[in-house]
Image (spheres, rainbow, N blue to C red):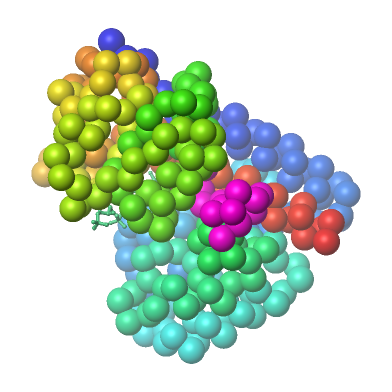
Amino acid sequence: MASIIDGKAAAELVRGAVKVRAEAFLQQHGRSPSLHVVLVGDDPASQVYVRNKELAAHKASISGLVHRLPIATTQAQLLTKVQGLSADPAIDGILVQLPLPKHLDEQSIIACLDPQKDVDGLHPYNAGLLMVGRPGLRPCTPSGCMHLIEAAGCDPAGKHAVVIGRSILVGKPIALMLLEKNATVTIAHSKTADLMSVVRQADIVVAAVGRADLVKGSWLKPGAVVIDVGINKKSDGKLCGDVDFAEAMAVAGHVTPVPGGVGPMTIAWLLANTVLAAERRAMS
Ligand code: NAP
């Protein structure tokens, strides 16, 4: 029987450490680190995510504001907004809640952020720093996954890691982070032939797909560390991941649950990146 990797408990520890740093920053600089979130439109899931981020920031002694813009916001208006926040010296972190409404071009909005304030780690400059192996603001979900892999007592060095999914948000950055930690990395995607055989070779599996219970227990190598990034809604309204949790528990060594695994780490890392951005800006 596998052990459950408790993302809630790990996130609680990260958030506690962030709060200590945020309070030290306030003592030293006379202001709290600040996070500004831009939310366009009224997508219910995004509203919940933003509210959770707002509450978590407040609890961690991070100040900030949510800028709620109407769905009719134009590309030019959003660019002006983000450029204004980027230019404001009192703001340390900016997050544009994704996905944006279809008529807006996410990539060009992200590219106009000040990379020093890009707490989601998605700006091409920060993606480039990760690519060349230099410290920078790194995407929150993959950073949280790496933390959970280490929390499970797994050193990726020399292990075979299979990442399912190749998005800019999760798959590609976590593949680079695993490589940086000396894992041998395979990136699988929707065109991968015989995915089951590929996954079967993995000591570490990261599933970031968005397909309920795609990865079966029979696909897993006994003892594997399984990080389930997927968030899917079942017909009964319950959330589940990309991995069949019950089956994985019978075969793997360590498994993250959904909910309560990667999700809490993502928010914790957003807070950590905000404090890091504030500390770096104060030093520059
Ligand atoms: P995405 O941009 O839609 O990417 C999904 C990836 O999965 C793509 O690379 C796609 O391949 C691949 N894929 C799709 N079907 C596949 C299949 N049958 N076999 C193998 N690969 C397949 O999604 P994302 O933004 O990376 O998110 C992935 C999941 O993680 C979603 O459920 C999302 O809600 C969740 N998520 C959770 C958190 C969290 O905090 N827990 C954060 C971010 C995302 P192609 O490239 O070939 O299309």
Mark yes or no: residue 64 visible.
no
Name the one closer to the observer, 157 or 120.
Answer: 157
Q: Residue at x 33, y 21 (%)?
A: 224
Q: Is residue 82 left or right of residue 191?
A: right
Q: Is residue 180 above or below residue 6?
A: below
Which residue corresponds to the image point at 60% horizontal and 49% vertical from the top-left? 133
Question: In the image, 1: left or right of 52?
Answer: left
Residue 261 location (% of width, % of height): 39, 33
Quadrant of res 240: top left
Image x and y of residue 245, in percent: 23, 27
Tell me if I can see residue 278 in this picture. Answer: yes
Of the pair 234 and 169, the residue shown nearer to us: 169
**Residue 217, relative to residue 111: is it above or below?**
above
- In percent of the image, x 69 and y 40: which residue is there? 19
Quarter occupied by the N terminus: top left
Region of the chain picked out in magenta, as a range? 128-144
- The count of marks equals 0
Question: Is 142 included in the stretch rendered in magenta?
Answer: yes
What residue appears at the point 74 percent right and 45 percent down from the top-left corner? 22
Picture quarter containing residue 164? Answer: top left
**Residue 3, position in %: x, y?**
36, 15
Quadrant where the C terminus is found in the figure: bottom right
